[in-house]
Amino acid sequence: MPKVSDVYMEITKEPTTVNENDSLETIRKTLLENPVSRCVYVLNHEQRFIGIITVKEIITTIGFRSSSRGSQSLSLRNMLQYLSKDIKAKDIMRPPIAVKVEDSFQEAIRLMMLHGYEEIAVVDGENRLIGDLNSYEILNCITLDN
C-alpha cells in the first residue's frame, strides 16, 4: 500500500504558508504567487501548523463582510482594502488537518474527501509543516485503465 512519502511533493515542492497574524491581503497575494495551491497553511510564531485557509474561505469572507455594509457598493479593490485592515489569518482559518509521511495514501485521500480539501498538509512529529499532498499529485500517481 503506497504511503504519503511515495507521492507528496512531486508537483508542489514547497507548501504555501502564511503567519497567523498575516492580513487577508497578504493571504491573497501569497495564493496568487502560487496558482497551483488552493489553500495556504497557517503557521504560528514557532512555525507549527495551526490551520488552513482555502480559497473558498477567502471568497466567503469577502462575500459576507461586503454584504454586511448594506447597500453601499464597493469596488473589488476597495472591498479588499476594507477587509484586509481587520481580518487576520487566525480569524478565518479552519482547524489543521494533516497526515504524516508514514501514513497511507488512502488515509490522505479519505481525509481530503471528508474535509473537502484539494490538498492536505504533511507534518512531522512536532506538527511542523514539511510538505503537502496536492490533488494534482494524486492524479499524477493513479491510473484509470480498466
Image: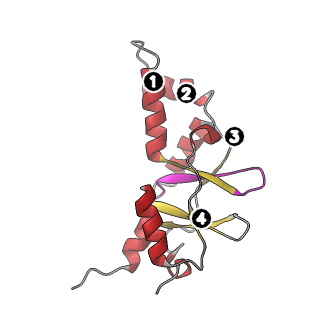
Q: Are marks 3 and 1 in contact (CB under 8 Å)?
A: no
Residue 45 lies in the magenta stretch: yes
Marks 2/4: CA distance? 28 Å
Marks 3/1: CA distance? 21 Å
- Residue 122 lies in quadrant: bottom right
Question: On screen, 13 above or below 42?
Answer: below
Q: Residue at x 21, y 85 (%)?
A: 146
Disc with the residue nearer the chain's start (1 vs 2): 1
Q: Secondary structure at mark 1?
A: helix
Instruction: Specify the label residue 66 is tagged with.
Output: 1
Disc with the residue nearer the chain's start (2 vs 4): 4
- Residue wearing tag 2: 83
Coloring scheme used: secondary structure
Task: Mark yes or no: residue 117 visible.
Answer: no
Q: x, y percentage for residue 63?
A: 42, 30
Q: Residue at x 47, y 64 (%)?
A: 111
Instruction: Specify the label residue 41 is tagged with.
Output: none
